[in-house]
Image (cartoon, rainbow, N blue to C red):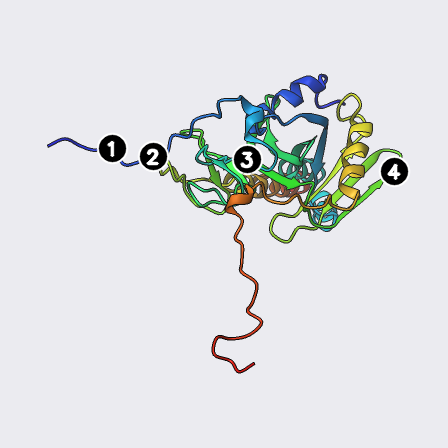
Amino acid sequence: MARFKDPNFVAAAFQPYLQPGEQIRNVAFGVKQPSMALIIPLFALAILPGAIATALLTKEYVVALTDRRVLVLHFKGSKIQVQEVLEYSLYNHAPVESSTGPVFTHIKINDPARPFVAKFHRAGMPGNREQAMAIAAALGQPPYPQQPPPHPPQYQQQYPPPPQQYPGQPQ
Amino acid sequence: MSYQQPYQPQPQPPAGGPGAYGRGAVVCPFCGGASNSQLCNWCGRDTTAPRRPCPRCGRMAQTVEPACWNCGARFKSDMAWKIPVIILLFVLAIALGIVLGLAR
């Protein structure tokens, strides 16, 4: 049932996409299945082709929570052949909806430019449920305050104060 | 006459190691240049944009771009072969059902 047996193998897949000094905190495996409005007619038409079609249309993701962002890898195959990389900053991200049930943890990021929705089965990977809940909790918190840009003080533009009186203005 | 290579930025890592980039500094996933803002100082791309690796050269390209900016390889969607396979499966299943129904 488990898609991956070793979480360290999944965490290693994120190494090429980490920024210098970035640390991974949690890793989880999730899937996005097609809509039930499509699955039910496919299964009603033919069971075996419907199951194959559902499997072909299911997208697989591994999600990593780091100390500064959430990285999402859309992949295929057992060797985690990356198809697409999405990232969401913890300092400034779109509203997130998350829920946890007895089997699945759902995470939905309502970003208009890069929406993400996936569900994480508790048996998808060892500790997948706890990892997914930790990622959902980190995304569920309000975004951290934006840090000021690290410009040195000498490059910050200083405007002179407006003159109180124009030259030549009668006293 | 000698051919002059086009200018390509070759960002050097900071002398103090990866931590010397400081908070807020990121490495552009497309060109590798260091930047202090969301837009890369070197190539101008959004460093947080959805991206995918080129299957030919391995460089990252934005998902919205139809071809690799480095080698020019065009990206193909997986749906290009999945949809015909799904349709073929259903056609075969329906045809098999009709044949089995006529054989009775």
Q: Amino acid at mark 3?
A: Val
Disc 1 crowd rating (10 Å Cα; few below 14, some 14-19, many 20+) is: few
Q: Quick one: which residue is furthest to the front in this view?
A: A171
Give the label, 1 or 4, closer to the camera. Answer: 1
Provide the chain ID for the residue under circle 4.
Answer: A
The subunit carrying tag 2 is B
Q: CA distance from mark 1 to mark 3?
A: 27 Å
Residue position for label 1: B5
Q: Which mark is residue B8?
A: 2
**In the image as oriented, which residue stretches furthest toward the right?**
A102
* Residue B49 seen in this snapshot: no
User: Is there CB contact under 8 Å for labels 2 and 1?
Assistant: yes
Residue A87 in the image: above or below residue A20 = below
Q: Amino acid at mark 2?
A: Gln
**In the structure shown, which secondary structural element does the residue marked by tag 3 occupy?**
strand
User: Can you tell which quarter of the image residue A120 is in?
Assistant: top right
* Image location of residue B90, percent across then percent down: 61, 42
Q: CA distance from mark 1 to mark 4?
A: 58 Å
Alpha-carbon span between mark 3 and mark 2: 19 Å
Residue contact between numbered discs 3 and 2, judged by CB atoms under 8 Å: no
Amino acid type for the residue under numbered disc 1: Gln
Chain assignment, label 1? B
Q: Are marks 1 and 4 on the same chain?
A: no
